Amino acid sequence: MPHRALILRIIPYSDSSRIVKCLVDGKGLQSFFIRTSKKTGAGGHIQTGRFIEYTTSEKSTGIRSIKESRQDSALGTNQLNPDSFGVWLFTLELLNKSLQEDFNIPGLSKKIDQYYSHLSHNTISNDPIIPLILLSQTFGIFDTKNLSINAPQTSIQSLTTLNIPVAKGKPPITFSDILERFKNHFAIQTLESIELL
């Protein structure tokens, strides 16, 4: 049975191979070696931000290898519009810079799947505060039940759609405040994707 993963980062290894860092359903951040073929076009689905289904070869010494892969049949066909693409890259960078190899955070993959599905169907706002709050809450940086968010009403409704409770009547916290707290928690120096927002 194939595993499911979200590709967070691709590192060139040679002309025909890559190291891919993936958020794997039920396993957390994992690294794999994968060969690509320019002749057949195989590996066209191996791109940052894509959801894949894959099988691995028998584990040997060193990094595991992906034997076969294909675009995820559930989420892989949903494409993002240009307005949502920048916030998706921001989400991927937050994940890539905060996750530790082989450390599974229960429910994270499901929440990211749900977020991407809503984002690709334009049923939630593409405000970057949404993935930032989603990840901050999932990682236990803060509990949104005790926070009032300074964001447009469409963003508050989007958080509700994602089952993220937000307090009312308390001093509001801004995107910049949440981002600084997130960066400090994970000792992140820079976020390049912030320039796309």
Image (cartoon, rainbow, N blue to C red):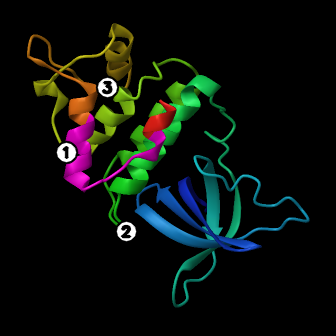
Q: Position of residue 124 (x, y in %)?
A: 46, 19
4 vs 133, left or right, is right
User: Relative to the observer, which residue lies in front, 162 or 98?
Assistant: 98
User: Relative to the observer, which residue lies in front, 50 or 197?
Assistant: 197
User: Up-down: is 143 above or below 43?
Assistant: above
Q: Indicate the secondary structure of the residue bearing disc 1.
A: loop
Which badge, 3 or 1, comes first in the chain's sequence? Answer: 1
**Residue on which disc 3 sits:** 163
**Residue on which disc 1 sits:** 140
Instruction: Report the number of numbered marks.
Output: 3
Q: Position of residue 88 (x, y in %)?
A: 51, 37
User: Up-down: is 27 above or below 167?
Assistant: below
Residue in the picture at 90% in, 62% down: 40
193 vs 38, left or right, is left
Query: Label for residue 102?
Result: 2
User: Up-down: is 96 above or below 172?
Assistant: below
CB under 8 Å between discs 2 and 3: no
User: Relative to the observer, which residue lies in front, 106 or 169?
Assistant: 169
- The 10 Å Cα crowd at callout 2, few under 14, some 14 to 19, many 20 or more, is some
Query: From which residue to which does the magenta span run?
Result: 179-193
CB under 8 Å between discs 3 and 1: no
101 vs 50, left or right, is left
Residue in the picture at 91% in, 65% down: 39
Q: Indicate the secondary structure of the residue bearing disc 2.
A: loop
CB under 8 Å between discs 1 and 2: no
- The 10 Å Cα crowd at callout 1, few under 14, some 14 to 19, many 20 or more, is few
* Figure quadrant of residue 60: bottom right
Which badge, 2 or 3, comes first in the chain's sequence? Answer: 2
Residue 183, magenta (yes or no): yes
